[in-house]
Amino acid sequence: MSAVLEIRNLHASIDGKSILKGVNLTVGQGEVHALMGRNGSGKSTLAYCVMGHPAYTITEGEILFDGQNVLEMETDKRSRAGLFLALQYPVTVPGVTVANFLRTAINARRKAANPQDKGISIPEFRKLLTTKMDSLQMDNKFAGRYINDGFSGGEKKRAEILQLATLEPKIAFLDETDSGLDIDALRVVANGVNSLIGPNLGVVVITHYEQFLNYIKPEFVHVMFEGRIVEEGGFELAEKIQEHGYDWVAEKYATVQQ
Amino acid sequence: MTDQNQLLAEIKDSYEEKYGFNVDDSKYSFKGQKGLSREVVAQISEMKGEPVWMRDFRLKSLDIFLKKPMPTWGADLSRIDFDDIYYYVKASERNEKSWDEVPADIKYTFDRLGIPEAEQKFLAGTGAQFESEVVYHSIRKDLESKGVIFTDTDSALRDYPDLFKEYWATVIPPTDNKFAALNSAVWSGGSFIYVPKGVHVEMPLQAYFRINTRNMGQFERTLIIVDEGAFVHYVEGCTAPTYSTDSLHSAVVEIVIKKGGRARYTTIQNWSTNVYNLVTKRAVAYQDATMEWVDCNLGSSITMKYPAVYLMEPGAHGEVLSVAFAGKGQHQDAGSKMVHGAPNTTSRVISKSISMHGGRASYRGLLKVYEGAHGARSNVVCDALLMDDASRTDTYPSIEIDENDVTIGHEATVSKVGEDQIFYLMSRGIGEEQANAMIVSGFIEPIAKELPPEYSIELYRLVQLQMEGSVG
């Protein structure tokens, strides 16, 4: 049975400032969603809240995943349950190689599932990593570099997708994975994401540009405005945004609020 | 590196058993009276059967010690009670040459330290210091045949009197500082190494040190002489059991490196957290010689240690690579001293410190360039990592440059483990405690990779142990 992420009436704040004001969103394994909206509309906050970033306080609402109450779970447990977030600004961890990072993450999953687990063997891990890196056209040397340390923008985004590919989550938020990429890098990353999308992976692509969406082709498009999802539709909604921008959204909903 | 986390996980279960040993006090063959006096010092010398010059050296050093005031510029040493310390304990009557002859209970202790295993793997020779006396020492035949001397310092005084006297206290005289004077008065044990011209000792020479009697000071004295074009790597690893009252450890390490020679001295210091660790370490490097200190300080209550390199002739190079970990109740006051006394001398310092649970790490460094040392180059990098708000880090750089034609770099950074880093690792399924450990392991990686592999693993393990319970 496929897993479903249900976000119900989610309110969240940071430093006392209210950012999310009642978000409802349901994402199933195997579905492709796009979450659009202007800067500051709450897209990244929503993704962080799903993953449990400590800076945000949930003031109301609930998040359910696979029948579990996500808000009661620590971030690492959410990850092991099958949630994933590809960060817009991936964090540098000096001295920790990409390979060490991923192997530790894989073993943490295996250990949580089975306390007796001895962890993935080195040959098995190497093979897995090489296969995944090849599919993303990444040099094998990449595995030995410190995670995000001195990476170019494109390398960081590719490293996020490599983690997505290796950890095989059920639902993944991709937070502006397209930003800062040139057209060639964008194609590689998009192809990488496309190759992962299938019955086992549902994605929520956060972006304000349609370019990335042309590659990914979401079935469901949601537009956020001032902490709520205000418009929902199919791919044609993304095309409308591309053509007309967000002004009409602002006009339509700003008045309602006042 | 990749198996490291598993190894780290395993040691938690057996650490206390493996490292927390205690041996029946009554088996010590000699334990002098507490406190320090001319009688105690003379008795130490007499028991060791030393020549008169050494006894006089000790007594003169005692006078210097008594005259010098306690240093007040560094860590708080006010709780040291010099009258409440045993200055000499002899664990066994004579030196053991082969492993078979080592008494069973001492052997059991070493077993738990993993020494025989390490030796089987690739020890070139082992000087394992149990209490104040070296009880076990072996040197491989190939080293002996090359003329390498690796013995305990007491034996060296007896067996190589001329060589010994030529270099003894030439790098660190008793007048250097109060604790060097104390060591000079009551020293016992330590390693003596001589590497003849052109000889490269490929395998690290290692010694383990233990403090294992309540309130017992340990004052080992190490002297290393690297002749022209020779090379040696000496590794000193310390793991100490836990005791309830304060203990003083005050070693002196002197190293002489002649033209074109190179020495590396690696330390993993993990004294129990009631130990005062006040150590003077200094090397003199002559023309084109290289000295490298790799210094990892994890344990002790207070450590004051500033490995120094005096660059005496053109082309000499000095390095200090150090890691300090200050946990609850600990003050690591560590650093380096680089003294450029000749043209075209170079030095490099990389210092990394971690403070957590209210611990305090200080970097105290001296960079001195004398007039005429033109073309001298030095680069100092100090990185501090703060794990929580209760902890503290300080940097006290002292830079004295009396020459214009020099290239000097000095940078210091302080970073806090951010919630974004922890979040990032946790968002990939890694638990909070392990995420913290990964960040710290990554932080010290540039130093850890300089260590021999088994020490590198030990360093990661010790750091992991220090961090246990850091969550919540």
Image (spheres, coloured by chain):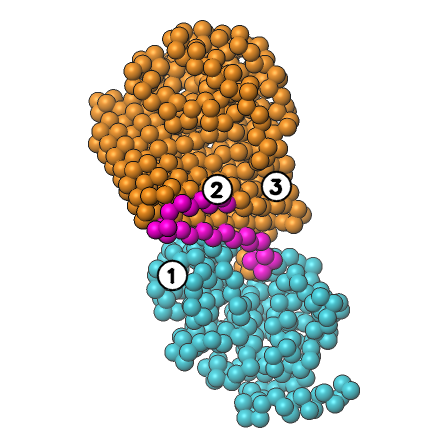
Residue at x 61%, y 58% (from the top left corner): B419
Q: In this picture, which residue range is highlighted in magenta?
A: B397-422
Amino acid on which the number 3 mark rests in the picture: Gly
Amino acid on which the number 1 mark rests in the picture: Phe
Q: Residue B112 or B191: which is nearer the viewer?
A: B191
Q: Chain of mark 3?
A: B
Q: CA distance from mark 2 to mark 1?
A: 36 Å
The tag earlier along the polypeptide, 3 or 2, is: 3
Badge 1 local density, few (<14 within 10 Å), some, or many (20+)? some
Task: Indicate whether B175 appears above or below A160.
Answer: above
Q: Chain of mark 1?
A: A
Colour-to-chain, cyan: A
Residue at x 59%, y 32% (from the top left corner): B72
Position of residue A252 measured from the top left corner of the image (x, y, whole percent): 70, 91
In this rendering, the label closer to the viewer, 3 or 2: 2
Q: Determine which residue is flagged by label 2.
A: B365
Q: Determine which residue is flagged by label 3.
A: B359
Amino acid on which the number 2 mark rests in the picture: Gly
Q: Determine which residue is flagged by label 1.
A: A142
